[in-house]
Image (cartoon, rainbow, N blue to C red):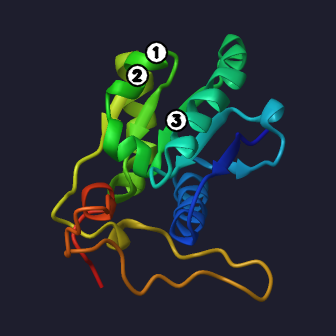
Amino acid sequence: MSKKVFIKTFGCQMNEYDSDKMADVLGAAQGYEPTQDVDEADLILFNTCSVREKAQEKVFSDLGRVQHLKAKGVLIGVGGCVASQEGAEIIKRAPYVDVVFGPQTLHRLPELLAERERKQRPQVDISFPEIEKFDHLPPAKVDGATAFVSIMEGCSKYCSYCVVPYTRGEEVS
C-alpha cells in the first residue's frame, strides 16, 4: 500500500506551485500519493503564507487540529514562508512538528524526512542554498488543461513593507 500525503496550501499562486512540487518530489523519491483526506494521510504538510498575520495564526490552529494524528505515527511538516520566517520557533510552539522547510529547500523534503526518522528529532532547513532548487525537482505531473509555470521567484528589491526577499530569497529567473 502506498503512502499518502495531505498538503494544505495557504496564500499565493506561488505556494500552489510549490505544493505541486512537494507532491512531485515526494512521489518521485518516496512513492507518496496525494490525498484530500487528512485522516488517511501518512504525512501532513502545511505550505504557509506570511503576508497576513491571520494566515500565520491559522497555521498554528490547523497544526493543533491534526496533533492527535501523531498517535497513529503521522508525520507533520511546515513549509513555505512562515516556515522560512519562523524556523525552529515553530518547533518550540508546536513540538510535535517533524520537519520545517522554506520555499528554497522544498526539494530536500525527502532527505529531511529521512533525517527525521534516522535522528528521531525534528529537522529544520530554511536556508537559501546557492544551488537552484529547480535543478533538483522532478518533471511536473500535469493533470488537466492548466499548470503553473514558474518564470521567476523571489525578489531583490527589499521594500520596507515586504517580506518576500526574506522568505523566498533573492530574485531567480
Residue 27, placed above or below residue 64: below
Mark 1 to mark 3: distance in Å? 11 Å
Please give the residue where the numbered disc 3 appears in the rendered image: 77
Please give the residue where the numbered disc 1 appears in the rendered image: 95
Q: For mark 3, does the 10 Å Cα neighbourhood hold few (<14), some (14 to 19), or many (20 or more) residues?
A: many
Drawn side of residue 129 relative to residue 124, left or right: left
Amino acid under disc 1 = Pro
Cβ atoms at labels 2 and 3 below 8 Å apart: no
Please give the residue where the numbered disc 2 appears in the rendered image: 91
Q: Which of marks 2 and 3 is nearer the N terminus?
A: 3
Residue at x 52% of width, y 58% of height: 25
Residue 67, placed above or below residue 27: above
| Count of all numbered marks drawn on residues in the image | 3
Residue at x 49% of width, y 43% of height: 53
Query: Regarding mark 1 in the picture, which secondary structure is present there?
Result: loop
Cβ atoms at labels 2 and 1 below 8 Å apart: yes
Q: For mark 1, does the 10 Å Cα neighbourhood hold few (<14), some (14 to 19), or many (20 or more) residues?
A: few
Image quadrant assignment for residue 1: top right
Amino acid under disc 3 = Gly
